[in-house]
Amino acid sequence: GRSQLVFVSSGQMAQLASGAWSDLKKQEKVSTDPKYTSRVRRVAPKIIQASGGNPSEWEVQVFASKDLNAFALPGGKIGFYTGILDLMENDDQIAAVMGHEVAHVNYNHSGERYSQQVGSSVALSAAQAAIGSGSQTSQLALGALGLGAQVGVLLPFSRKHELEADKFGLRYMHRAGYKPDEAVRFWRKMASQKSAQGSGAPPEFLSTHPADQTRIAQLEREIALLK
């Protein structure tokens, strides 16, 4: 229901991501522990099918790391870290994050973000040519333009991507037979974990991710629509 500024196709982004995925599997320790792999590989096919995809065209890996993270790359690559899996109490919570990551790929958020960054770079280059770079004033102007592009465009779109992925990921998990309420439980647990670790987040307008309460409030609204 919204327009996207996209200069590159999903296929082009998949090509760009392919090398990164290969490098990542060499650099990170891939876990073969069934305590983790069986959980992820049990959930992944259901979420992918619920999103309209073919599980045989996706690759799922678990990386042995305490990081509280998961990600998906264009071309159907999904990575989960053992740290975030240790925090997840059930398959429903895995499905919440899995759905979120699959939605990022399906809606070509990486292509949109890439296009925005290219557009921002072009605009700044044009501004530099127009203003000139010799004076302190021009340098300050360019700095302000850079901050404006980052805070005014790139970061808000990134937050929009996160909330969009939450919304459609929730629909995927619901369609796959998982409990949407567990998405809220998981994100509350993540918020508590960050608070316990003392990892203070920057103000929402300077963050690439929505504030925990913003995310939870939207999830609760979306869950109400599914009932």
Image: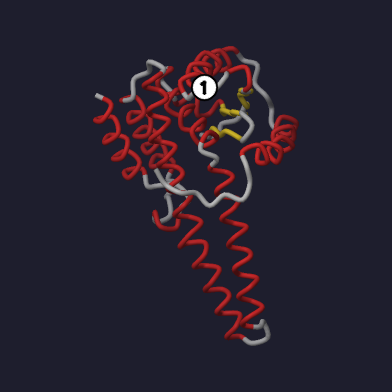
Residue 81 image offset from top left, x and y in percent: 57, 29
Considering depth in this image, is 9 or 57 the residue closer to the camera?
A: 9
The 10 Å Cα crowd at callout 1, few under 14, some 14 to 19, many 20 or more, is many
Q: In the image, is 98 to the left or to the right of 120? A: left
Q: Residue at x 59, y 68 (%)?
A: 123
Q: Name which residue lies at 31% across and 39% down.
A: 218
Q: Does 187 appear above or below 124?
A: above
Q: Quadrant of the C terminus?
A: top left
Q: Quadrant of the N terminus?
A: top left
x and y percent of residue 208 in the render? 48, 50
SS for callout 1: helix
Three-letter amino acid code of the residue under disc 1: Ile
Residue located beneath label 1 in the image: 48
Find residue 58 and report its horizontal and vertical position in percent: 62, 23
The residue at the point 61 percent across, 35 percent down is 73
The percent position of residue 84, horizontal first and vertical second, equals: 50, 29
